[in-house]
Image: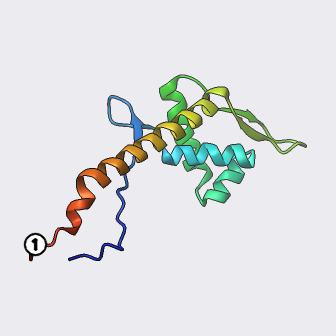
């Protein structure tokens, strides 16, 4: 019998995809936009996330094209150094994804605790 002190948890990933199965938004893009918001630029976000600038830019561009709206307001370089800020749409995506991600995880945990976890501790020798 397994030790009941071991606590198991279920994990899941959610994302939004288009009708062809292309990822439009998920945890990766959530992290990218959150980091751009925090750092103020794609370049700084790329460094913090240890990702290539082009990889980040490609993911943002794919999502923008699918949504038909920009996610970033880009300021080109110069004396001020440029940078990027989130559009209202991007901020809304972050907030709504955070909400749905939390709710999906909570429901998955409840389902796991109710339907699956108790059966992990059945002693077949009795």
Residue drawn at (30%, 53%), measured in percent from left and top?
Answer: 112
- Name the quadrant containing residue 122: bottom left
Q: Is residue 73 left or right of residue 62?
A: right
- Which x, y percent locates residue 104? 40, 42
Residue drawn at (31%, 72%), measured in percent from left and top?
Answer: 4
Residue drawn at (70%, 50%), measured in percent from left and top?
Answer: 43
Residue to which mark 1 is pinned: 124
Closer to us: 26 or 110: 110
- Which x, y percent locates residue 21? 33, 36
- Name the quadrant containing residue 1: bottom left
- Which x, y percent locates residue 20? 32, 32
Q: Is residue 120 left or right of residue 30?
A: left
Q: Is residue 92 left or right of residue 74?
A: left
Q: Looking at the image, what colour scheme do you see?
A: rainbow
Q: Is residue 16 above or below residue 27?
A: above
Residue drawn at (22%, 65%), measured in percent from left and top?
Answer: 120
Give neighbour class at mark 1: few <14, some 14-19, many 20+ (Cα, 10 Å): few
Q: Which secondary structure, mark 1?
A: loop
| Quadrant occupied by the C terminus | bottom left
Closer to us: 62 or 126: 126
Q: Is residue 60 left or right of residue 88?
A: left
């Amino acid at each position: 019998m397994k030790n009941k002190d071991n606590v198991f948890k279920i994990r899941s990933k959610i994302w939004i995809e288009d009708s062809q199965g292309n990822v439009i938004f998920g945890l990766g893009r959530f992290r990218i936009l959150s980091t751009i918001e925090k750092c103020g630029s794609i370049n700084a976000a790329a460094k913090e996330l240890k990702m290539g600038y082009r990889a980040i830019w490609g993911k943002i561009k794919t999502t923008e094209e699918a949504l038909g709206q920009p996610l970033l307001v880009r300021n080109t370089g110069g004396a001020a150094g440029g940078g990027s800020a989130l559009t209202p749409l991007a901020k809304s995506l972050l907030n709504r994804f955070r909400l749905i991600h939390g709710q999906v995880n909570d429901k998955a945990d409840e389902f796991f605790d109710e339907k699956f976890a108790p059966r992990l501790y059945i002693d077949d020798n009795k």
